[in-house]
Structures are given as structure tokens and as C-alpha cells.
Image (tube, rainbow, N blue to C red):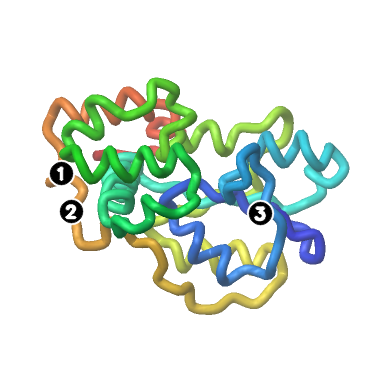
Amino acid sequence: MICHEHKFIFVHIPKTGGTSIRRALPEGDDCSVDGSPHGTLAMYHKHYGEPIFSSYFKFAITRNPWDRVVSAYHFNRMQPEEILDQDIAPNWKKLIRYAKEHSFDEWVKTPPFADRQLYFISLEFDFTRATTHGLDFVGDFASLQASYEEACKRIGIPSTTLPDINHGSSHHDYRSQYSPETSAIIHEQYRNEIELFGYEF
């Protein structure tokens, strides 16, 4: 999302607590190719141009990819059946069906889309990569409240207690969901951000 009043861009990476942060931030506009709230940093740069992009405060929240994949699976699996009859994005509908009909092991080994960009757990590296300037601040899901407060401090706006929204795997120990094989698959798929942010299984 982008807020012109307070001059900031928040890159909402899926399953990183972004919905909670968006609810707590001042209102802004989205920038994506499909109307979703998950616009990448490069999209904002292309759409708004260099003067705005370089002068606005840009931040994102990242999350351990092993944890995030588990969260994405359970988030889709727990969706009510009636949502499949609603007018939602076809790709999301496909993900919900796939999660409900397959085990987590199958979710990791045989994802429903060959194109990784269509998968709900698109890579953090792709969301935070831009043509020239990078992010001014990168917070972590493991310390979400503190990361949000630091972003607000840098923007110059008051912070509040974040609402608890869309915690699809809050009751799961993500490590227990993996086998050595599936853990290795995630390591390979997310190698760039594991190295960039220093994540460990």
C-alpha cells in the first residue's frame, strides 16, 4: 500500500502479518497487477516513478519461509466451504481446494501451480526487489509489534496495538510439519531470502 499523506510505501508480503499492519496504518492505495493488496516493490517503482518512489519511506515485514509456508497451507485449508461459491480470484479458489484435498507434505512436494509467481507463497525476494532503491526498513514477523512500532516511528505517526488477524498457523509448531525432504525443498526454493535474512530451520 502507498500513503501519500504520510509518504510511505508498505510492501505487503503474503502471510507476514501484513493485514494486521494495514488495519493499523493510515489508509492508502494498493498497487498490483490483479487488484490484490500484495504489490511488489518493483510495481510501486514502475507505477509511481522515481521522484515519489525515492522520497517515500519504504518498508516490509519478512518471515521465516518454513514458518510462512505452513501458515499459507493452514490459512487456505481452514477457509469455509462456502467461500468456494463466492466471487474470489480463481487462483485463490484453486489453492483453497488444493489445501483441503491434500496433505502438507503434498502441498510442498507438488504445488498446484508450476509458475511460482502464481503460488500464494510468492518469494519474499521477489516482493522486495526493485530496479534502483531498496527498502528503508525490513521488519520481522517474529517481532511483529516491535517492527510495526519502529516503522511508525520512522514515518512519524503514532502506533497502536496490532489486531490479531489471519493467523492461519498460530497453533502449529512449523518444524513438526516437515520431513527432511520437504524441509530441503523449502530451503532450495527460498535460498535467496534464507541467505539474505539469515533464516534457519
Q: Kindly report which numbered mark, 3 or 2, lies closer to the viewer in this rendering.
A: 3
Q: Residue 197, can we see it?
A: no
Circle 1: element type: helix
Residue at 44% in and 22% down: 115
Callout 3, which amino acid? Met
Where does label 3 land, which residue?
A: 1
Residue at 71% in and 56% down: 29
Tag of residue 177: 1
Q: Quadrant of the C terminus?
A: top left
Number of numbered discs present?
3
User: In which quarter of the view is residue 81 placed?
Assistant: bottom left
Question: From the viewer's perspective, is 125 left or right of 99?
Answer: right
Callout 1, which amino acid? Gln
Q: Nearer the viewer, residue 174 or 33?
A: 33
Q: Residue 24: x, y in percent?
A: 57, 71
Q: Nearer the viewer, residue 196 or 83?
A: 83
Question: From the viewer's perspective, is 30 left or right of 174?
Answer: right
How far apart in space, not on screen, are marks 3 and 2 (Cα)?
30 Å
Circle 3: element type: loop
Q: Residues within 10 Å of mark 3 (few under 14, many from 20)?
A: many
Q: Quadrant of the N terminus?
A: bottom right
Where does label 2 land, which residue?
A: 173
Tag of residue 104: none
Q: Is residue 26 above or below residue 32?
A: below
